[in-house]
Image: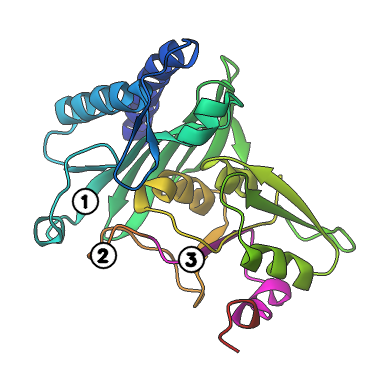
């Protein structure tokens, strides 16, 4: 697994270099997809690099990628092992040039993300996670082990929210926590903030797809945290016909402070 993670890390960095080539241009080759979301030349370039590199290194493991061909569930349902890829997560952040976009590559086995790389090329930051633990690397520095935060009495809840997709339900949950600090962030970096102990909670009570979360979910798991749906069951991958995730919460731990008010916030109580 360590060798696999090293390979995925190298592939993510190659894709990141291609993304930065486009990032610094005046014309980023923007198109609009069928769902009205933006698609740039960087998305396409990163997808080509990742798809070709994974096919060469692991020809027997199929790839589910945001920018890949649509694959019928009847075919995907037979995949017990696959890569789940978002070549450029946070395209809106990319276009806003705030640096908060990532390359996400995860290995999923039997529905669980067992290894993942989240690379933020503009920030020079990479998060990695597998069964051996989680780490963060900044630039050329040696990787540093990371772990979710332990509870601290009297400390306000540190909650991460989406910069581009805020919802009233998230604000209602924050209000229910009492004393809390809300920080906005783009892309899968939100999950990684929980993984490294910089935040306690990331409630995503809005739509996402499996490739948005799989790699960072692997990092959170490796760091000792949880990513659960609103029934407090672990988020799974390639086990449903739709590639859309249910609403989910990333947290350092299951805690009555947020699990208690969650049904009311969602109108289930």
Residue 91 image offset from top left, x and y in percent: 46, 33
Density class for disc 2 (Cα within 10 Å; few <14, some 14-19, many ≥20) is: some
On screen, 97 above or below 265?
A: above
Magenta stretch holds residue 257: yes
Closer to viewer: mark 3 or mark 2: 3
What color scheme is it?
A: rainbow
On screen, 104 above or below 180?
A: above
On screen, 89 above or below 208?
A: above
**Distance CA(mark 1)–CA(mark 2):** 11 Å
The single residue placed furthest to the right in the displayed view is 154
Left or right: residue 159 compared with residue 166: right
Q: Which residue is mark 1?
A: 81
Residue 58 image offset from top left, x and y in percent: 18, 33
Q: Which residue is mark 2?
A: 239
Q: Which residue is mark 3?
A: 247
Magenta stretch holds residue 116: no
Q: Can residue 147 be spotted in the picture?
A: no
Q: What residue sits 34% from the left and 48% below the top?
A: 35
Do the numbered discs 1 and 3 sit on residues whose CB atoms are within 8 Å? no
Q: Secondary structure at mark 2?
A: loop
For the record, the magenta segment spans 245-263
């Amino acid at each position: 697994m360590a060798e696999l993670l090293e390979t995925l890390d190298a592939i993510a960095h190659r894709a990141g270099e291609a993304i930065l080539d486009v990032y610094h241009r005046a014309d980023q080759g923007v198109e609009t997809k069928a769902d009205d979301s933006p698609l740039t030349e960087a998305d396409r370039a990163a997808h080509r690099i990742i798809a070709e590199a994974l096919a060469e290194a692991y020809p027997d493991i199929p790839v589910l990628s945001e920018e890949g061909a649509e694959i019928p569930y009847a075919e995907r349902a037979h995949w017990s092992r696959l890569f789940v890829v978002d070549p450029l997560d946070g395209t809106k952040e990319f276009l806003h040039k705030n640096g908060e976009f990532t390359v996400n590559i995860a290995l999923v086995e039997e529905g669980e993300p067992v290894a993942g790389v989240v690379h933020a090329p503009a920030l020079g930051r990479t998060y990695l996670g597998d069964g051996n633990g989680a780490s963060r690397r900044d630039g050329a520095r040696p990787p540093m082990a990371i772990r979710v935060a332990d509870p601290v009495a009297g400390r306000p809840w540190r909650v991460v929210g989406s910069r581009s997709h805020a919802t009233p339900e998230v604000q209602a949950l924050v209000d229910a926590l009492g004393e809390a600090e809300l920080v906005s962030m783009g892309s899968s970096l939100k999950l990684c903030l929980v993984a490294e102990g910089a935040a306690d909670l990331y409630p995503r009570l809005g739509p996402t797809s499996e490739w948005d979360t799989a790699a960072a979910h692997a990092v959170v798991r490796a760091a000792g945290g949880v990513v659960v749906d609103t029934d407090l069951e672990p988020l799974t991958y390639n086990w449903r016909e739709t590639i859309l995730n249910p609403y989910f919460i990333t947290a350092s731990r299951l805690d009555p402070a947020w699990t208690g008010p969650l049904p009311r916030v969602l109108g289930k109580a």
